[in-house]
Amino acid sequence: MWAAGVLIVAFLATIAVGVAGSALQPPSHVETIDPTKVWNDPRFAHPGVTVDERGATVVAVGMMFAFMPAEIRVPAGRPVTFRLTSADVVHGFQIVGTNGNTMVVPGYISQFTTVFREPGEYLIVCNEYCGLGHHLMSAKLIVEEGGARP
Ligand code: CUA
């Protein structure tokens, strides 16, 4: 009994450490979209990056078996908000080596904000099995020192 209780406390503690220590949290932003009309929706008609004085916003679409856009440039050291959706099935969006990681679910817009301290090139992979070309589904994130200023 006590051992089970200790384990439960330990599991809860790992969640608390992840939230407080690594700023990991499930995307809680509930916004829906018609998955059959992604390309006509004004929110996703022009995927890409916009930069303003507060940081950057990345609008991207996951589809079998690519991300659009396939290359994303953002500034280092400033908040970057990702807004993602799928044009077909469930995909993943994991920026390897960072805390950027979310499911991309048709019908929903996944949104999260993070800051990239280290300039460099990061690999973005789909981490949800989405079909025969799943292993080919990737994109590149380029974090630039200073980055594009508005
Ligand atoms: Cu998309 Cu796996």
Image: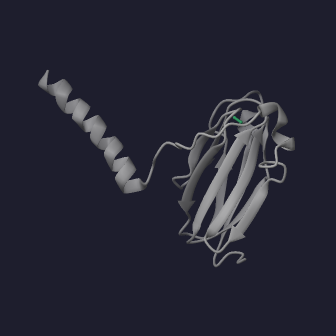
The residue closer to the viewer here, 135 or 114, is: 114
Name the image quarter holding residue 15: top left
- Point out the residue furthest to the right here: 40
Query: Is 73 above or below relative to 38?
Result: below
- Residue depicted at x 79% and y 42%: 66
The residue closer to the viewer here, 103 or 44, is: 44
The residue closer to the viewer here, 121 or 89, is: 89
Relative to residue 141, is residue 47 drawn left or right?
A: right
Give residue 20's position: percent from left, percent from top.
35, 53
Give residue 37's position: percent from left, percent from top.
84, 36
Q: Quadrant of ligand 1?
A: top right
Check the picture and name the quadrant holding the C terminus.
Answer: bottom right
Name the image quarter holding residue 31: top right
- Residue depicted at x 77% and y 27%: 132
Query: Is 103 above or below relative to 101?
Result: above
Relative to residue 6, is residue 109 drawn left or right?
A: right
- Residue depicted at x 70% and y 32%: 107
- Residue depicted at x 66% and y 30%: 129
Check the picture and name the quadrant holding the N terminus.
Answer: top left
Query: Is 135 above or below relative to 48?
Result: above
Q: How many marks?
A: 0
Give residue 88's position: percent from left, percent from top.
77, 31
Relative to residue 68, is residue 115 drawn left or right?
A: left
Give residue 142's position: percent from left, percent from top.
69, 64
In this picture the colour scheme is one colour
- Point out the residue furthest to the top here: 1
